[in-house]
Image: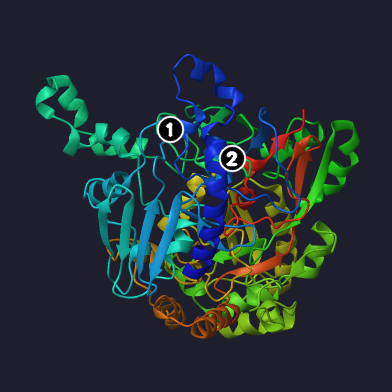
Amino acid sequence: MSGFWQNRAAIVVGILVCLITTISNATEVPYFEADVAKGILPPVAERLPKTPRVVPLGPEQEIGQYGGQLKTLIGNPADVKLMFVYGYARLVGYSPELEIEPDILESVDVQEGRIFTLKLRDGHKWSDGHPFTSEDFRYWWEDVAGHMKLSPAGPPATLLVKGEMPKVEFPDALTVIYSWSAPNPDFLPQLAAASPLLIYRPAHYLQKFHEKFVDMSKLNKIQKIKFKAWASEHNRKDNLYRFDNPDLPTLQPWRNTTSSPATRFVGKRNPYFHRVDPDGRQLPYIDELIFTVSESKLISAKAASGDVDLQARGLKLQDATFLKAHEDRSDYKTLLWPTVRGSHFALYPNLNSENKMWRNLMRDVRFRRALSLAIDREEINDTLFFGLAIEGNNSVQEQSDFYTEELRTKWAEYDTDRANQLLDEVGLTARDDDDIRLLPNGEPLVIVIETAGEDTEQSDILELINESWHEIGVAVFTKPSQRAVFRNRIFSGETVMSVWSGFENGIPDAVASPATRAPTSQISYQWPKWGQYFETKGKSGEPVDIPEALRLQELYANWLAATEDAEKEEIWKEMLDIHADQQFTIGVVGGILQPIVVKNHLRNVPEEAIFNWNPGAQFGVYNPDLFWFEK
């Protein structure tokens, strides 16, 4: 990987030599001309780093024009974070070919897979014009992640390698070194994620809210009383990813200027953004992003009416025919990008349920296998996805080298006889007058499946699952709630089973992190307390106590320590086999086509692409800062 970057860096350096004169005499971005003329902003040549990142054009992309507002719809105010996701400025990021390369960083040198020397771009600035330096990394590491009041559990557990936190050094203003005694192949993918590991903060802004940097002697009595709650205030303002604090400087191509809560968020271009096009012109091309909150069920109708310039959020394959029918009238086209999650829709039995009876059932692999076998995936595919989906487990898609038919179909072929036999073996033999099996406490076996209440498609799928599960004496009750409530109930163990999409990366290779396949995160709805235990280094949550899940943790640790791709491949294969056999999550259908509505005068949006969260950041890897409007 280092060699790839070095070769690519040599090419970029060659391009930059040709660009230096162009940038120094660059035409000002029209959006900023008035502010530059008034002296509010420096000229563009002074706003860019000395070596900006040159963004290459894709095969379907061309040099663009400045200007315009890009309008899109979101389902709730929390989705303003998509400005951060779509902007996809990362220390290192994925290319459209899903190779990791420097972005915010000028370069990365990796030695022995364990020493990472991060080089910053000289002259790079935050969106408010303040220098972006190693101090911003030091502040996060020592004064945020290392401060008990701000981070009671300490730095993120994802930085642990064999129980060891990294050694972090800041030899000069443009250099940061992370090192471990063993390899950490997960480090760069974490930095490149859609929701990345953020190891820096705008120190100059946040220090104003930190007890270490505030002179208490200069505060009056009332100010001192207010400052007692400084930690919560600091954390409230420290929202680089959530993107809901307009005062917080950013490195993204657009900065949110609207406080939450709101129904319309405006993202204005970052005057100090570090990327340029091949002609040396500062990006982004588009001046503003307009994110408008809409009821999810109305998004497809509004898109068809021409109310958006670019839309994927809230659109489903079932909307494609309707959207196609209105293309000419509303001056847009509908693209269909394949999704590559492990499964488009998956059930998550909560193995950490607080209810002892349900916890025992969910931990019985026979019960989980029976539920999977009793899902009529073909009916769901034909009824809701025009027969175009791929039926099977929450595993990997055909584009992955790890794909096998067994991974897709094991315990996932419709077989109610086998499912009934398994439930009988569990001891659930008694039934009521409605032919519903009885739980050990004598109550009907009704599984309450909780959803975030944001998608009618989930309800439609659950209704079909309810029908097929009646064949094995199991009933379903669907319980929707707001996303925050939904997650908190899962985390606390109140939820018995939930619904979400499957594993984000359904096309992994050997060097892709298998962290999500092991109990490493609280946001793993099948084992939230095990994940929390890992994230907090044992300070909260529960330790893993199922052999197969313990083996997944062990395999993940082995993957982190592995130095050869062949060894990593074998680890991946065993982890995938365990998941298919154990049905920790129950996949239904995958490979769904995602409709993308694109206004006809919006350029540089790829005609063919994949739509994925991680890796991909949905639109992020295709550089929306290169998208432009033809006037």
Give the vertical position of 250 relative to 109 (above or below). above
Using the image, determine if residue 194 lies above or below residue 131: below
Please state the horizontal and vertical placement of residue 562, each as a whole percent of the image: 43, 81
Taking the image as shown, residue 117 lies to the left or right of residue 274, namely left
Q: Quadrant of residue 113?
A: bottom left
Name the disc covering residue 245, or none: 1
Residue indicated by mark 2: 280
Which amino acid type is marked by label 2?
A: Gly
Q: Quadrant of residue 240?
A: top left
- Nearest the viewer among 547 and 342 is 342
**Which amino acid type corresponds to the residue marked 1 in the rendered image?**
Asn
- Report x, y in % for residue 596: 75, 46
Which is nearer the N-term, disc 2 or disc 1?
Answer: 1
Point out the image quarter for the C terminus: top right
- The answer to whether residue 189 is visible is yes
Residue at 61% over, 80% down: 423
